[in-house]
Image (spheres, helix red, strand yellow):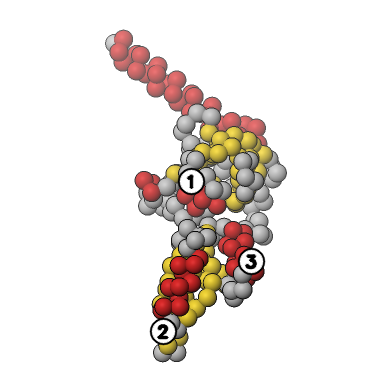
Amino acid sequence: MGKRALVKGSVLLLLLLLTGCASGTYTSRYGRGGPPVGWKERGIASWYGGKFHGRRTANGEIYNMYDLTAAHRWLPFGTLVKVTNLRNHRSVIVRINDRGPFVKNRIIDLSYAAAKALDMIKTGTAPVEIEKLPAYYGEIRMAPAEGYYVQASSFLSRWRAQQLANRLARHFGTVRIERANVNGLIYHRVKVGPYFSLKEARRVQHWLKRKGYNAIIAD
């Protein structure tokens, strides 16, 4: 065996050993089930979106940036964790279905939907605390693929719907008007959103109700 081949083989062996140590950290300490419920970790979170949308994740699923999922270096696939943004104290529950992040000093890589729920899209990263939840968490409710919309009102008149949409646009980033055929009549539904956490959608709903609108949450 030549020197080049020997060096190449040594480097490969070292990489395998390092990989084994990294992936085996939780196994040796906690077993295959990972850490116990209530385990917490603090560090920097990042997020990944459109570039990876539609690609296969480490557990074999197709990555959907609008699902509440995340990548972690070693937590078992399927683990539910509560992620709290330590800057604004917003929280979101995600399911681990991928491996990463592969950047030093980052502990979790969130989907676009999860990052939006934590209000960290613009910053790209945020200091977070993650906490392991039970395998079945009764409070969890995943957002629909396109998020939650809050319907402020519905009109037969397109003009009235547009007037309301213009007013709401001053307070909300996105307002849309949807046509709906109800018993042969065309209604124009004014919706704001999307919101990727039910808590955030309810907050907007309550705000609209205080303003006198009969707001409802719609997918």
Q: Position of residue 129 (x, y in %)?
A: 63, 40
The quadrant holding residue 203 is bottom right
The answer to whether 31 appears left or right of 49 in the picture is right
| Residue 176 visible in the snapshot | yes
- Lower sequence index among marks 2 and 1: 1
Q: Which residue is at a point 54% across and 27% down the rendered structure image?
A: 21
Q: Amino acid at mark 2?
A: Ile
Q: Position of residue 69 (x, y in %)?
A: 51, 50
Q: Which mark is residue 206?
A: 3
Q: Relative to 175, does residue 9 appear above or below in the rendering?
A: above
- How crowded pointer 2 is (Cα within 10 Å; few <14, some 14-19, many 20+) is rated as some
Depth check: give the residue in front, 60 or 188: 188
Depth check: give the residue in front, 2 or 105: 105
Q: Are marks 1 and 3 in contact (CB under 8 Å)?
A: no
Q: Which residue is mark 1?
A: 121
Q: Amino acid at mark 3?
A: His
Q: Amino acid at mark 1?
A: Ile
Depth check: give the residue in front, 23 or 73: 73
Question: For the residue labelled by badge 3, is the local secondary structure a helix, a strand or a loop?
Answer: helix
Q: Which residue is at a point 45% across and 26% down the rendered structure image?
A: 16
Question: For the residue labelled by badge 2, is the local secondary structure a helix, a strand or a loop?
Answer: strand
Q: Which residue is mark 2?
A: 186
Picture mark count: 3
The quadrant holding residue 179 is bottom left
- Lower sequence index among marks 1 and 3: 1
Q: Position of residue 116 (x, y in %)?
A: 51, 51
Q: Relative to 202, does residue 83 appear above or below in the rendering?
A: above
Question: For the residue labelled by badge 1, is the local secondary structure a helix, a strand or a loop?
Answer: loop
Image quarter in which the N terminus is found: top left
Depth check: give the residue in front, 213 or 63: 213
The answer to whether 164 appears left or right of 209 in the picture is left
